[in-house]
Amino acid sequence: MPVRVLFVCLGNICRSPTAEGIFRTRVQAAQLEQQIYIDSAGTGDWHVGKSPDSRAQKYGLEAGYDIGDLRARQVSAKDFGEFDYIVAMDRQNLSDLEAMQPTDFSGSLSLLLDFDTSAGSDDVPDPYSLDASGFKRAISLIEGGCDALLLDIQQQFLQAKSGGL
């Protein structure tokens, strides 16, 4: 069974689909597509079924990440039984997820930037109401978080499942 990772932000149109796209690229580069399943969702339902924000797509594509095929969905209680890592983009979304978390959840519920000690921030700021620099900063923070998360999964989860990579 693959390690299952869910990225979560508020509406699932900016940060979490960007994280899904960046992480997917990192996983493919490491040739781990068969070992790691990736998805994203939002705590809110405003954008369910919609494509990522056009600015997230534009600046993501400029950075080498095509997220145009993704569609927003809302996180659900069943996700806690299906994902090993549920990764929030900010403290508010983490708090919302903690309120939903069933007592028997045995996975990892954390902030993305908890994995990247060099980030200098806990939260990936929501770029929705910001300009290009806000989206570019979000991408940069997400890249660092995704690199650190992949390393954590390789060290903690995949090695335990396979006896080492």
Image (cartoon, rainbow, N blue to C red):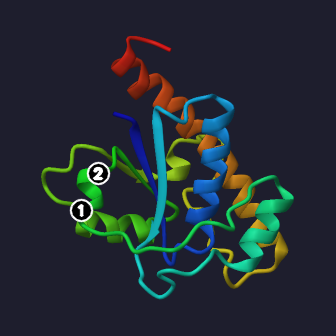
Query: Would you name the residue on which mark 2 appears?
Result: 82
**Residue at (62% x, 28% y) in the render:** 31
Residue 88 coordinates in the image, percent (x, y): 46, 60
Residue position marked by numbered label 1 in the rendering: 78
Q: Residues within 10 Å of mark 1 (few under 14, many from 20)?
A: few
Circle 2: residue type = Glu
Furthest residue to the left?
A: 103
Marks 1/2 in contact by CB < 8 Å: the verdict is: yes
Q: Residue at x 55, y 30 (%)?
A: 32
Above/below status of 104 relative to 163: below
What is the CA distance from the residue labelled 1 to the residue labelled 2?
Answer: 7 Å
Residue 29: x, y in percent?
A: 69, 33
Q: Residue at x 66, y 50 (%)?
A: 22
Question: SS of the residue at dot 1?
Answer: loop
Q: Which mark is residue 127?
A: none
Three-letter amino acid code of the residue under disc 1:
Lys
Q: Name the quadrant containing residue 25.
A: top right
